[in-house]
Amino acid sequence: MSGFVSVWAVGSGFARAVAARCRGAAPVRVVGEVLLVAFGGAVCGVLAAAVGVRSVGGWVVRRGLVPGGFTVPVVAGPLVIAAGVGVAVAVAGACVAAVRGVAGLKWLRLGRLLAGVVLLAVAAAVPVLLAVRPEPLLRQTLLGEPRNLSVWLLMWELLVIGTVVVIARPSARRAVVFSSATPAFLVVALAGSVVGSAVVFAEARDGQTRAVLRAEYVVETDGPDGLPPDEVVEGLRELGGARGGLHTTTVAGTRLSALGKRGDGRGGPVTEATAVDGDITRAWDLPVEAGSLAELKGPGTVAVSTRLAKARHWRVGDRLPVRLADGTATGLRVVAVVRTPLVLSEVLVPQAVVADHDRSMRATASYISHDSNSFVSVLYGMEEHGESGAGGVRMMSADEWTGGSGSPRNRYLWTALVVLLGPAVLSALIAVVTTTAGLSVRKAVLVMSVAAASGTFVTFVTQTVTAWLCNRWVDGAAVPVVRGVPWSVTVPTAVACVLLALLASFVAARLSGRGREGETALPGQ
């Protein structure tokens, strides 16, 4: 995300500055000045990152995105890479603008046209690929997993936005105005598309979960450290034994390597698995394609998703070699092929299989099948549904858990989006200021308005395609294909761009003493 923004925002900003002042100046000198300025900016950015990274780390800890005690180390590698990319992009943008402004070479236009055609073809092919889901894609451990559809969607959205920028890029005559519009377009399109697709994906996930969840209540951790097993799981079991009719199914995440790989299994891909403690059929009504989930108990059994079974040609009764988290080699017999929801992994194993081999495993949720909320609330000091209890534990009804904005899953999603979008949007907003400082107030408003409208339209397109793909990837999802634009995101970002552009153009005009039409023109403009 940050790399993408640096390519268009930083490159566009430097290209605009060079194009506006390259008349009569030697391209080598102009590029040399850009290199000096970019290097100084990169040094300042590295220093700011080294200081600010700890504040960001503390913020994500307080938001519960990572376990307590987590710290972000200052590592030289990413800082050097980021600085190098920033300088390289700035110099590249300056070189293109300088050569175009001085020589006006036609091959630059042809290269841009060819790049636009290629990007457009790839952007059109990606949704088709995701909709068809060919077998090579299904075989990919990470890319083919439905839970990772959001990663594909982010890549596709960046590709679409980049395609629009390349195809819409005008000739040298309009380069200054276009370069001023690019950062604002990025802000609106990125924020709207990424947030909008996240909302659609969460809606598909929650709809799917509601369709197959049998449990009446869900006890879930209110942080990333996992449920305290001694205080919650054992306590729920005791309550169930005392009152009768209370069934609990607890799940935890674990990692398996080289699942189904022949030979010694070393170096095989890592597969995320869900360890189940209890009867999963009482918590979930999972569609079974073959076999029986009732046999998922005791050592040596495993249930796999229909995607994995199809991609790897597994059948019920097959014995799959595997290495557990501590490296222990064993074998698991496939007892069921099921359609797993997004909130569970595509591999389900009894907790007895992995309990002694994964010391870091912590329970993540416990599903309760009994109308006993009042008793559980008293037991753990929870006053109402959704209130935090002992050990950072929350109890919610099934309806709350599958659709409430206060669900830990949704709160983690929004925190992750802020971490993902924050630096990129901030960089683009800074570029809005730097690229509109030479425009008149009237032209700045016009440019920002067109950019915001274009970004909103791109958001609508990505929203619609995202909903369509979610309906095809997520079993049980019923997301309306025609989606509204997330106005709560696009409107504030558009307003922020307009206000910043107005401020920048007004201040620049006042400081320079030029009138309202005091822009520097390109050669021949």
Image: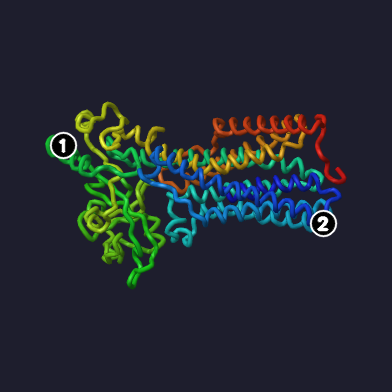
Outermost residue toward the top in this view = 383
Q: Is residue 303 above or below residue 203?
A: below
- The amino acid on which the numbered mark 2 sits, given as a three-letter code, is Leu
10 Å neighbourhood of mark 2: few (<14), some, or many (≥20)? few
Residue beneath the point at 70% across and 46% down:
12
Q: Does 150 sit left or right of 164 as displayed? A: left
Residue 171, x across and y down, in percent:
79, 48
Q: What residue is shown at x 68% (from left), y 46% (from top)?
A: 165
Q: Secondary structure at mark 2?
A: loop
* Residue located beneath label 1 in the image: 239
Q: Label 1 near label 2: C-beta < 8 Å?
A: no
List x then y, in percent, for residue 403. 39, 34
Query: Amino acid under label 1?
Result: Leu
Residue 291's spot in the image, x, y percent? 28, 56
Q: CA distance from mark 2 to mark 1?
A: 79 Å
Question: Does dot 1 land on a helix, a strand or a loop?
Answer: helix
Residue that protrudes farthest toward the bottom in the picture: 263
User: Residue placed at 59% from the left, 54% from the top?
Assistant: 125
